[in-house]
Image (cartoon, rainbow, N blue to C red):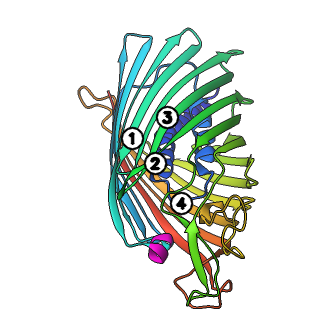
Amino acid sequence: MSLGGTIFLRICARRRLALAESIRICCNIRIAMGFDMRLTLLALLFFASGVEAAVLPEERVDLLYHRYDGGGVVVDGPSVLVRKNIGDSVSVGANYYLDNVTSASIDVKVSASEYTEEREEYSVNVDYLRQKTTMSAGYTKSDESDYTAETYSLGISQDMFGDLTTVSMGMAYGDNTVEQNGNDDFSEDVEVRSYRIGISQILTKNLIMAFAFETISDEGYLNNPYRSVRYLDATSPVGYSFQQEVYPRTRTSNAAALRGSYFLPQRAAVHAGIRYFDDNWGIESTTYELSYTMPWAESWIFEARARYHDQDEADFYSDLFPFEDAQNYLARDKELSKFTSTTLGGGASYEFGRSWSGIERGSLNAHFDWIYFDYDNFRDLTEDGAVGDEPLYDFDAWVTRIFLSVWF
């Protein structure tokens, strides 16, 4: 492989932390970024971890600050990740993650008052390397005032054909408990099972392709205990009333993602991906992504990226039902509606400390994303308009990630 190709693979590997932290932020805060975004991000994380040969993760410490600000919701907090190798075959990692949430979202404005809460997450994972096979296991626990989650995961990857091909598969089980603040008698369980398989292939010295497929099965209380739907009511002064959402107690989701990276002259690279999602609730979505990475001098890496997401609504979603108990299942969650989102972002990484005693190297990273959400059939009830003809809702958000990584 050429020197340029080697540098390209190093760039892809270093992008893993930024991508992983982005995934953690978007998944953990669980806000209006598309109901199925977790699948998109997990598929991309699989790709990022599959471009290297079978080696243990590098020993490092990562310190992160993240912030999401949009749609009346602010989420921010720190994260700390430590990874240490034991001998030549075992790597152990531990992570602490904190979300501080202040919410005055459109749902809160319509039916409740602004609230704040805190969410903590702890996780540990172990990787075991034997020749060209890497086996991994992980455990994650998160707590907030009304939601507790525990997740157990197993994975295995195998390099073959001269380390040009990596095949990976994994599974995870989540045991979650949903509660309701102010109602001590409310407690519901949610079980989540996920299975994934993928393959990454170095096709030429300049081109890497990866395919990933994942299926997720959810069972239990799957809706939000605080959210309501609205229905026409001639006896109400505003022309409509609210009732509790009702969701099915099972859901099966499938996602397939194809992604490629191509090395360009001047040590740059372009990355593109497409991903399709569907579930048995009637949601279908397609996501397109494009990014450009450009090293500069010996210490800098710059990145620009764009993403477009298009989603159809769930079968039982409606912004306004014709009457109370209009059907068996009822939803007015904007994440289940028909909408599009557009993301534009970029970032920079600076590598330092190659000659520091006890430190292999370090990097300081800053990434920013602007996201615009445009809803086709979810209306803004805080604005004036005839019942069912209020202005359609839209908003934008900023996502910020600043983190320091030190390898030792």
- Amino acid type of the residue tagged 3 in the rendering: Asp
| Secondary structure mostly seen in the magenta stretch | helix
Q: Which residue in the protein does label 3 denote?
A: 175
Asked if the residue under mark 2 is in contact with the one under mark 1, i.e. CB atoms within 8 Å, the reply is: yes
Q: Is residue 349 left or right of residue 235?
A: left
**Measured from the top left, where is residue 119 in percent x and y?**
35, 49
Q: Give the quarter of the figure containing the N terminus.
A: top right
Q: Give the quarter of the figure containing the C terminus.
A: top left
**Mark 4 neighbour density, 10 Å: few (under 14) some (14–19) many (20 or more):** some
Q: Which residue in the protein does label 2 denote?
A: 28
Residue 207 visible from this viewpoint: no
**Measured from the top left, where is residue 174 in percent x and y?**
52, 34
Q: Mark 3 or mark 2: which is in front?
A: 3
- Amino acid type of the residue tagged 4 in the rendering: Gly
Query: Who is closer to the viewer here, 46 or 385?
Result: 385
- Which badge, 3 or 1, comes first in the chain's sequence? 1
